[in-house]
Every structure is written in structure tokens, then in C-alpha cells.
Image: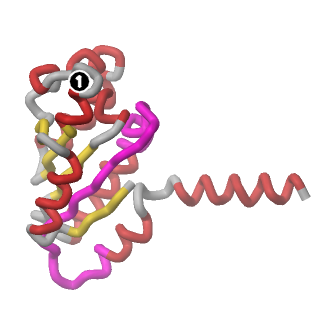
Amino acid sequence: MYKLKYFLYLCFLLNANQSFAFDELQDILSHEKQPAGVVIEISSGDRLYLAKIIVELKKDISALRSKFTNLPVAIVSHADESLLLTKKAGVSHPTLHKEIKSLSNTGDTTIHVCGTYASWFDVMEDEFPDYINVSPAGPVQVNDYVDLGYIHIEL
């Protein structure tokens, strides 16, 4: 019985990793008309979460853009993972920063971190690179995008 549970759990993990939000992605791709945009909210207790999902996240954004060429995408991070986006953290996580920078430089993708959350850890706005937008409050930033008609995906 233990082996069966372990096998099923392993299958779940492998499927869960196929896309950052597989069901939501498939739903958006099923739309005939391009949505106003997509806002991806990331709020994880895992400081390395963004580093773990960045490759899949980029693939999924690419899949969205293959159908909707000019689809605006916003990524809003407002928890531990946002602290890995500082200039200082870029020294020890250069691949993550390279991937985030390439996202912000290609297409219509905007990357936000929560200034309030960062300030709780004495991280100031100028400690983030220029390709990261520091919003006063991450949840408010998400709501602003939703008010503009963006589809909200929460990770």
C-alpha cells in the first residue's frame, strides 16, 4: 500500500510541474478573443519558489503569446520569493535574474514586487534592478490589473 501511495504522489508531482497553472492556462488558451491581459500573482513562503518555476513560467507565457501575440502579462510577487529579485540576490542567483530580465525585455511583460513586503525586511526600492517595478502594495497592484480586465492567476 505504501508503494502505491508513493507512486500516486510522484505522479501528482510530475503532473503538477507540467505548467505553472495548467488548468488556468488551458482555459485562457480556449478563448477565441484575446483577453485584456493576464496577471500572475505569486505569494509563496518559499524564497526559492520563483527560481524553481521560472523556466516553466516562461514556457507558459510563450504558449499564451503563441495564440495571443500581443498579450500583456504582469507578474506580481509579494512574499518571500520577491526578496530573491534584489540586486544583491542577483549575484548568487544570476540565472533567475537573467530569465526575469529577459521576460521584462521581451513582449509586454511587467514584473512587480511589493514594496511593503520588502520594507518589512529593510529592503528598499533602490535595491531592486531597473527591470523590477516596486509597487507600494502587491495585492493592490493585482487588483488594479483585475480592474483593467486582466485574468487573474494565483500561484
The residue carrying mark 1 is: 86
Q: Is residue 9 above or below residue 115?
A: below
Q: Say which quarter of the image contains residue 25.
A: bottom left
Instruction: Residue at 11% x, 60% y: name it.
Output: 144
Left or right of 30 on screen, residue 119: left
Q: Which span is picked out in magenta?
A: 28-54
Residue 153 screen position, x and y as percent: 32, 62
Residue 71 screen position, x and y as percent: 14, 64
SS at circle 1: loop
The C terminus lies in quadrant: bottom left
Which residue in the rendered view is the most extreme toward the front? 120
Q: Is residue 101 above or below residue 62?
A: above
Residue 39 lies in the magenta-colored region: yes
Colour scheme of this structure image? secondary structure
The N terminus lies in quadrant: bottom right
Neighbour tally class for label 1: few under 14, some 14-19, many 20 plus, Cα within 10 Å:
many
Q: Is residue 104 above or below residue 8?
A: above
Q: Say which quarter of the image contains residue 52.
A: top left
Question: Which three-letter amino acid code belongs to the residue tagged 1?
Answer: Thr
Residue 116 lies in the magenta-colored region: no
Between 19 and 152, the one nearer to me in the picture: 152
Instruction: Residue at 23% x, 48% y: name it.
Output: 76
Between 77 and 130, the one nearer to me in the picture: 77
Which residue in the rendered view is the most extreme toward the bottom? 32
Count of residue discs: 1
Residue 23 screen position, x and y as percent: 43, 70
Left or right of 38 on screen, residue 84: right
Instruction: Residue at 35% x, 76% y: name it.
Output: 27
Left or right of 3 on screen, residue 96: left
